[in-house]
Amino acid sequence: MIFDTSQQVAVIGSSSMVGSRFCDLTKNIKLIKADLNGELKVDLTKPDSLQVFFKENEFHAVILFSAFTDVDQAEIQRGDTRGIAWKINVDGVKNIVDLCKSTKRKLIFISTDFVFDGQKGPYSEDQEKAKDSENVSWYGFTKIKAEQFIEENITDYLIVRISYPYRGPFKEKEDFAKQILKKYQENSLYPMFFDQKLTPTFVDDLAAVIDFLLKNDLKGIYHVASPKVTTPYEFALKLLNKFVGKTLYLKKGSIKDILGGSKATPRPIFGGLKTDKIRQLGLLPTPFDLGIDKIYDQSNGKLI
């Protein structure tokens, strides 16, 4: 059934870094915006809170942007299924799935390339996720378990994976680009990896992609990321040259040296996402270098 534009869509996590931009750019779908601390409050970890939200609001589909995304803080909780990362990313998703199933609503779940082991990327939608927690971060493992629960319990769903998201001005949280710029300004920028492969997601791309997927009632897994693979070093060099306005000396580092430490958070080395699937639909995600140009223009050269 083709999506009726008169139907409403719930957005949980509407003030988040990614979710708020989606709300800003979405003009032709009626949104019900909810958040843990918003005017319309909802708490993923409390089934009663979600039940009230689902009962009192009319919507055809729900987009779940809310998540515990601090990879290093999640790693501290490794193995703890009572920790906040697990409660939000796994138990919270289960609560949403159960309600979507019982009320026959579509679920759009925002996920990550961290569900892969990061050894053979970039990855397509049909490639196998990591099987256990040994070769992925704890954050990545919680997203794996969430994806698995969705796939096993409902049929009307979209899983939209993104990778190292960045956007224009947003004061509430630093993203991949803002972290680099801030540390550079503070003279504390660590060596940037030259041997890690990634495909950063320009957050603005999500609005058009989700709009298209919803209106055409598509299902399954889709990737939204830069079609051009880069490295943290290359991304940082392009970013700093654009915002600082001069050629810089940037220290190089190897991710293999960092991950050799016993306390290091596991991260994909050859990660990233392939985007052939959405490109075949006529949706063209933004290459990372063009995305940097866009956030420069959106911020008038002052991103932070």
Image: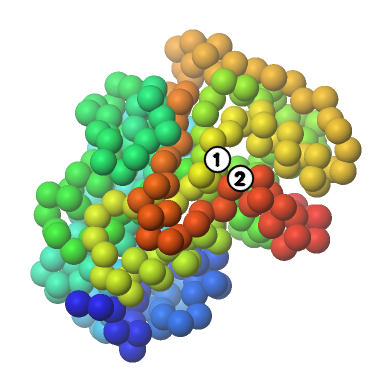
* Callout 2 touching callout 1 (CB < 8 Å): yes
In which quadrant will I find the N terminus? bottom left
Give the answer, above or below, for where 10 lies relative to 303. Answer: below
Q: Residue at x 80, y 46 (%)?
A: 243
* Residue 187 x, y percent position in the rendering: 81, 31
Q: Position of residue 152 (x, y in %)?
A: 12, 49
The total number of labels drawn is 2
Q: Is residue 269 left or right of residue 141?
A: right
Between 259 and 90, the one nearer to me in the picture: 259
Residue at 48% x, 32% y is 72
Can residue 132 be spotted in the picture? yes
- CA distance separating discs 2 and 1: 7 Å
SS for dot 1: loop
- Quarter of the image where one finds residue 241: top right
Q: Nearer the viewer, residue 292 or 280?
A: 280
Amino acid carrying label 1: it is Lys
Label 2 CA crowd tier, 10 Å (few <14, some 14–19, many 20+):
many
In this figure, which residue is indicated by the disc labeled 2? 288
By what rule are the colours in the image chosen?
A: rainbow
* Residue corresponding to mark 1: 228
Which residue is depicted at the point 32% across and 48% down? 89
Q: Quadrant of residue 56?
A: bottom left
Q: Amino acid at mark 2?
A: Phe
Q: Is residue 265 above or below residue 261?
A: below
Q: Crowdedness of circle 1 by 10 Å Cα count: few (<14), some, many (20+)?
A: some
